[in-house]
Structures are given as C-alpha cells and as structure tokens.
Image: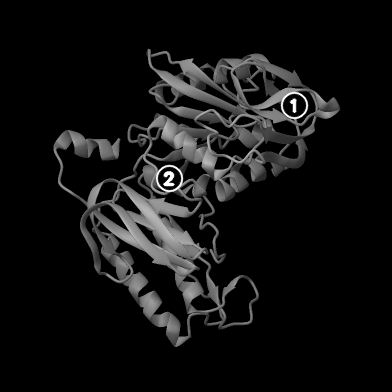
Amino acid sequence: AGGLGGVFEPEGVADSAALRGKLMLCEMDTRSWAGTDPIAPARDAQEFAAVTWRNIATALTRGFTPYWMDVHQDWFAPETLQPIIRRQAEVLKESVDWPHETVPGIAMILDDEGVLETNGDGRFLNEAVLWEWKTGLVRAGVPVRKYLLDDLGLGNFPGHKVFYFPNLFRVDDKRLKLLEEKVLRGGNVVVWGPGSGISDGTRIGPESATRLTGFAFELLPINYPRRTLLSNTSHPLTKGLSPATLLGGPLAYGPVLFPTDGTPLGMAWTKLGRNLTGLAVKEMAAADGTRYTSVFTTSPGLPAAFWRNCARHSGTHVWCDEDELVMADASVVALHSVVSGPKTLRLPVAAAVTDVITGRPVAESTREIRFEITGPDTRVFRLTPDKKPRAEARGLRE
C-alpha cells in the first residue's frame, strides 16, 4: 500500500468477496515521513496523495473498503496531510450512493485448490499470480479483476471477455463443463498458464491438457527454467511488442508442456537448444457454435501490451494505450503514474466527468479525458454516463 508506481491489492480475493455480496475491509498501510519506521514512507505530501488516492480508487472500482492504519507513530500528524485525508473521507462517504457496476475487462481466475496439485512451496504461484498481476495485467490499460474458479458458476458473474488461468492444473468433467458454458465461447480470449489441465484428477499427462486447451503437446517430465523469446509480431496478440520481449525467469519447475500446433508466437529456450514453441495461439470452435481464442504459454510474465492486445482481440474496450496503472468501473476511472506528461483515458460511452479529488466538473459529455500530471500523481474521475436507449445502456454492463 505504500509503493509509488505499484499496485494496491488486498490480502485476499476482493473481487470474489464483492461478487458474493460480502463486506471486505482492507488495511491501507500507507506511512509518511512523520515517524521512524523505514518501511516505504511517503517522503512528502505529493507522494502521500498519489499513493493513497490510488489505493482509494482501487477500492472504489473493486468494491472493498480501505481504511487508514496508524500503529503508534502518528504518521498522519503533518498539517499538509490533513486536507488530503479529509477529502478522501468525504469521497468515501459520497461513494456509498454512487452506482457501482463492474465493466468488462480482464479476469484472472484462481483455482484455490490448485496448490494441492503442487509440492506446496508456492514459488510458481508467486511468479504466475503475484508478478503476472503486478507487472503485466494491471498495466494493460483495461480494468482487471481477480476471481475464484467457483465464481464462474454464479449467476451475476460479469461479462468479461479475456480470461487468464494461471493455476488450473486439474480439470475433470464437471470443471470442463463449467468452462464450456461460461468461458470457452463467444469470441473470448482465454490464456492458459504453464501446466493448465495437466491432470484429469486421476493421472498426469498431455491428454487432459489437450482436452482443456485445444493444443497438442509434447510433455517433458523434468523441472526446467522457463524462458520464451517472442518470435512472431505479425499476429494481433503480439502486434507492436518488442522483438526483445522475453518471458519467464530462472525458476525451474515441471513437468513441462510445449504446444506442438497452433500459431507459434514465441520460441522456448530449452535444454539442448531444441526448437520448441513456448507461446502459441489457436482459434477454436465452441460447443455452442461460436468461436474463441486459446493461448498457451509455457512461461509466465506476459507484458502489458500483450494483455492489451488480448482485450482488443476480444472486443473489450481499452481505456488507456500506455502501460499505466488504470482502475475503472462504470462510475469511476483513475490513473496512477510516476511519469510526468500528458495522459489520455478513453471512455466506453459518452459521460459527464467530474474530478473526484477537487470536486470540479471536467466535461458535460465526452468520450475522452485528456490531462497532464507531474509524477507521482493519481487522478480520479467520476463518470455519469449520458442517458442512452435501453439496449445501448445494457452493453455497458455486458
């Protein structure tokens, strides 16, 4: 909760709690220079405002409640911080009456039983969940949410079009049916992490992974570091990415699945220099007659631009074309950055825009918000969509 340019994320799956109508309180452990604790203190009022407004915007758009935390050092004593906190408290109270509705974005789907399919040391999950979230997903310029696998079965699950499954190792008939009904259809883009579907609940092998993802695989029963070099920038999912894009890292784990069909997007660096695919895409026919895009990666660490392309490919609205931290729902959009300069946020529908921090109106009706910042800074905007015919308004929700 203290780092500039970083991510504010509760120690729990807040989006799942909100989806299930639960109240989630989150300690906003943001400190200031007014104390002796060396853990990430804000060095001045501007840093404090940038960090805490980012945290509050995250909470406003994700449906949980943050609170300031001061253990014993009176971090909030400086007079320069009082107006900031006062306005934040006012906004939190005002936001109770705002409509809060999730807009289509990218959904990370966690199997909370997935760790039981591993040796339990958690290093893979640190790479594929925490760092994928912090370094790639949240910088895609698209709202991102984190859910549990069981949430897909809820009647109020939002209409996301991009899905990422970092740890769905075990897929039996019941789970596959749920995925076919809710995910593997309708033009969605589905990204499978390493080891996806490698178990059917009784045995480990490439057959169950093929049944889930649609790719044929070569399986190597070894632990090996994952590194994939981007080799194809002509596909819509990799267009604009640097040819120096390198996925993965030195962490060794296995078994290793390498896709042997589909369109190769990246080449895996493997033992003995074998020419194997580490990132591939395949267009799939869905059980309901529609189509969807399946992506398999042997290495976590997909960059923000890749996720942004996934959103575009699925028809999901992209709010920002830069690798900035963007938070949004139907009523609020915010941008946090440490880089000074002009910024642009594009809205999915025309709306009246108000600056949440100052309370001043920005525009009566617009599809685009342009502004300048001096980093570090966070800008937060309230959106009141123009009144539209019922069918068009429904598209915002779906």
Q: Position of residue 178 (x, y in %)?
A: 45, 23
Residue 156, compared with residue 42, is above or below; it is above
| Residue type for callout 2 | Val
Total marks drawn? 2
Q: Which amino acid does label 1 sit on?
A: Pro
Q: Name the residue under label 2.
A: 142
Above or below: residue 46 compared with residue 16: below
Name which residue lies at 34% across and 74% down: 87
Precedes in sequence: disc 2 or disc 1: 2
- The residue labelled by disc 1 is 255
Near mark 2 (Cα within 10 A), the count class, few <14, some 14-19 or many ≥20, is: many
Say what secondary structure mark 2 lies in. loop
Whole-number angstrom distance, CA of label 2 to CA of label 1: 33 Å
Bin the neighbour count of mark 1 within 10 Å (Cα to Cα): few under 14, some 14-19, many 20 and up. some
> On the rendered structure, is 96 left or right of 290?
left
- The residue depicted at 42 percent of the width and 49 percent of the height is 320
